[in-house]
């Protein structure tokens, strides 16, 4: 199998037909030696998506489907597809035609120029309201600033990845999936192709604000310890203020003699204790960050190439 296309489906009855046709129109002329498969993951749709998929699968052997027992969410749906994909290369694409299938040859072409990941970067986005665009813009920039790995800004999950990267993702058993971040974490040579993101072809977005906030939190907590360090920083700031107030008190007591007894001792002790408490919370935060890293059970490193026999533990060879 040369290429697998992973398509999460949540209430996409109005898009499945057109998506299927456009995918075929693009994929069939492509020189894919081992053929391709389309993997549709029905993520608990409440509309006619499943019967449509079953119908496609009965007519076309290249159509695979995975039907979830309920709505597990977009990232989990993509994960299920990646777990079962057999292709040497795998494309992740939204079902609502916001990610144009016509970009696939360009992505595939780049992959063959020696990259392991080619993501599609949004040059512009249409058909989405100002709030969504603004929050997305802000989120990707904040995330880029507080993580050590470089998660590309303005990209969704629309991308092509090689078999190596799929194996890498399978070695990351973490519960809270943020696939675009995981793929950056995995490394290898990555590049991008730019495109203009269209509006949704039909139907409505399955991403409620609630789901978006969850995704954002998953992304931040999985790839950054910055929020845990806020307490430490706050603690040092407050302690610093306490120290300055202390100095000022001494100055007014002994130099200017403009001194009101009572408040300086209260102020200094409250601020100082507050600072100490915040720093303590920060120390606990540091331990939690380490626990968190261990609980995720990620491989320590991923080896791209070596002339040594496979290691027995620690890192993983893709
Ligand atoms: N999706 C899913 N489960 C969900 C929400 C969305 O599988 O709980 C799918 C949806 O069918 C689409 C993709 O994820 O293929 C992106 O969702 P959507 O277009 O609603 O998100 P948006 O483009 O508005 O961010
Ligand atoms: Mg969409």
Image (cartoon, grey):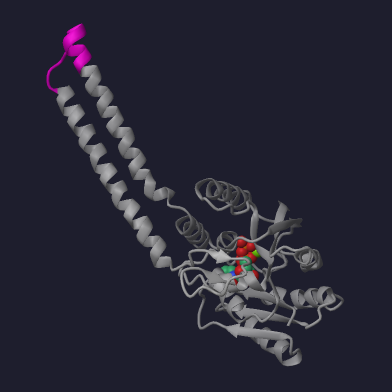
Q: Which residues are magenta?
A: 250-262
Tell me: residue 185, above or below residue 238.
below
Whether 260 is among the magenta residues is yes
The residue positioned farthest toward the left in the image shown: 261
Residue 49 visible? The answer is yes
Q: Quadrant of residue 66?
A: bottom right
Residue 121 or 210: which is nearer the viewer? 121
Tell me: residue 76, above or below residue 288.
below
Residue 149 or 314: which is nearer the viewer? 314
Residue 252 or 315: which is nearer the viewer? 315
Q: Quadrant of the N terminus?
A: bottom right
Where's ligand 2: which quadrant?
bottom right
Whether 274 is among the magenta residues is no
Give coordinates of residue 104: x percent, y percent: 78, 68
Q: Tally the marks.
A: 0
The residue positioned farthest toward the bottom in the image shown: 58
Give coordinates of residue 220: x percent, y percent: 48, 55
Residue at (53, 73) in percent of width and height: 76
Residue at (70, 63) in percent of width and height: 200
């Amino acid at each position: 199998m040369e290429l697998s296309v992973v398509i999460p489906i949540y209430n996409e009855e109005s898009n499945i037909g057109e998506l299927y046709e456009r995918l075929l129109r693009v994929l069939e002329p492509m020189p894919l030696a081992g053929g391709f498969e389309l993997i549709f993951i029905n993520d608990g749709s409440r509309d006619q998506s499943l019967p449509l998929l079953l119908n496609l699968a009965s007519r076309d052997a290249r159509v695979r489907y995975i039907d979830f027992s309920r709505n597990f969410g977009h990232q989990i749906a993509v994960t299920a597809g990646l777990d079962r994909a057999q292709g040497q290369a795998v494309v992740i694409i939204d079902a609502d035609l916001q990610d144009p299938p016509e970009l696939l040859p360009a992505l595939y072409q780049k992959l063959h120029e020696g990259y392991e990941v080619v993501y599609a970067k949004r040059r512009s986005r249409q058909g989405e309201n100002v709030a969504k665009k603004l929050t997305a813009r802000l989120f990707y920039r904040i995330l880029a600033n507080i993580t050590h790995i470089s998660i590309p800004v303005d990209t969704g999950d629309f991308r092509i990845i090689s078999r190596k990267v799929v194996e890498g993702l399978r070695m990351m058993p973490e519960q809270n999936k943020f696939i675009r971040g995981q793929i950056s974490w995995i490394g290898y040579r990555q590049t991008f192709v730019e495109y203009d993101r269209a509006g949704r072809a039909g139907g409505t977005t399955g991403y409620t604000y609630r789901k978006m906030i969850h995704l954002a939190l998953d992304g931040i907590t999985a790839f950054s310890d910055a929020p845990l360090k806020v307490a430490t920083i706050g603690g040092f700031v407050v302690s610093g203020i306490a120290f300055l107030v202390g100095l000022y008190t001494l100055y007014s007591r002994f130099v200017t003699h403009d001194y009101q007894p009572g408040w300086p001792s209260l102020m200094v002790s409250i601020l100082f204790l507050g600072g100490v408490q915040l720093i303590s919370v920060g120390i606990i935060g540091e331990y939690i960050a380490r626990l968190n890293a261990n609980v995720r059970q990620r491989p320590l490193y991923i080896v791209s190439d070596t002339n040594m026999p496979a290691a027995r533990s620690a890192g993983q060879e893709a």
